[in-house]
Image (spheres, rainbow, N blue to C red):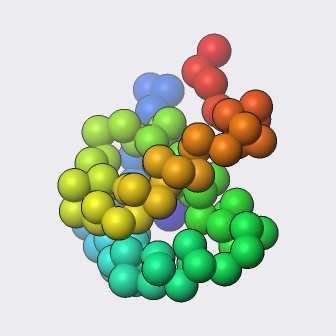
C-alpha cells in the first residue's frame, strides 16, 4: 500500500481501492496458508509474518484477524518464535 502521512498517522492514499487490493491478497494467503505453513521456515514466512506484524503495529484499527482466521492463527505461531519476539516492533 502507498501511504501519505498526515498528522502523524498514515492514511491510504487511494482509499478503498488500496484496501480492496490488500484484502484480496490476504484472502489468497488465507487460502494458501496450509502450503506456507507446511514448508520449511524461510524468507517467505518471514516476509509474510513481518507484513502482518506491521499491519498490527501501524494500523491496529484495520481488523483483519476475524476475516482471515487461518492466517491469524499462523501469525500467532509466527509471533511466538523466539527470533521474532527478539526483533518485534515496539512503539517508542
* Displayed quadrant of residue 32: bottom left
Q: Nearer the viewer, residue 24 or 71?
A: 71
Tell me where residue 46 appears, x and y as whole percent: 70, 61
Tell me where residue 90 appears, x and y as whole percent: 62, 24
Q: Nearer the viewer, residue 7 or 83?
A: 83
* Displayed quadrant of residue 26: bottom left
| Number of numbered markers | 0
Q: Nearer the viewer, residue 78 or 8?
A: 78
Q: Residue at x 22, y 62 (%)?
A: 67
37 on left or right of 65: right
The answer to whether any part of residue 18 appears in the image is: no
Q: Is residue 37 above or below residue 82?
A: below
Q: Nearer the viewer, residue 77 or 31?
A: 77
Q: Residue at x 66, y 80 (%)?
A: 39
39 on left or right of 10: right
Tell me where residue 54 appears, x and y as whole percent: 55, 46
Q: Is residue 49 above or below residue 28?
A: above
Residue that protrudes farthest toward the left in the picture: 66
Location of the C terminus by quadrant is top right
The answer to whether any part of residue 15 appears in the image is: yes
49 on left or right of 21: right
Q: Residue at x 73, y 67 (%)?
A: 41
Q: Is residue 7 above or below residue 68?
A: above
Q: Residue at x 45, y 33 (%)?
A: 9
Tell me where residue 13 appears, x and y as whole percent: 41, 58
Amino acid at each position: 500500500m502507498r501511504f501519505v502521512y498526515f498528522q502523524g498517522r498514515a492514511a491510504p492514499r487511494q482509499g478503498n481501492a488500496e484496501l480492496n487490493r490488500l484484502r484480496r491478497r490476504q484472502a489468497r494467503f488465507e487460502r494458501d496458508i496450509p502450503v506456507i505453513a507446511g514448508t520449511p521456515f524461510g524468507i517467505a514466512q518471514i516476509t509474510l509474518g513481518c507484513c502482518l506484524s506491521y499491519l498490527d503495529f501501524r494500523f491496529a484499527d484495520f481488523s483483519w484477524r476475524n476475516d482471515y482466521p487461518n492466517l491469524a492463527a499462523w501469525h500467532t505461531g509466527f509471533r511466538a518464535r523466539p527470533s521474532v519476539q527478539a526483533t518485534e516492533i515496539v512503539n517508542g
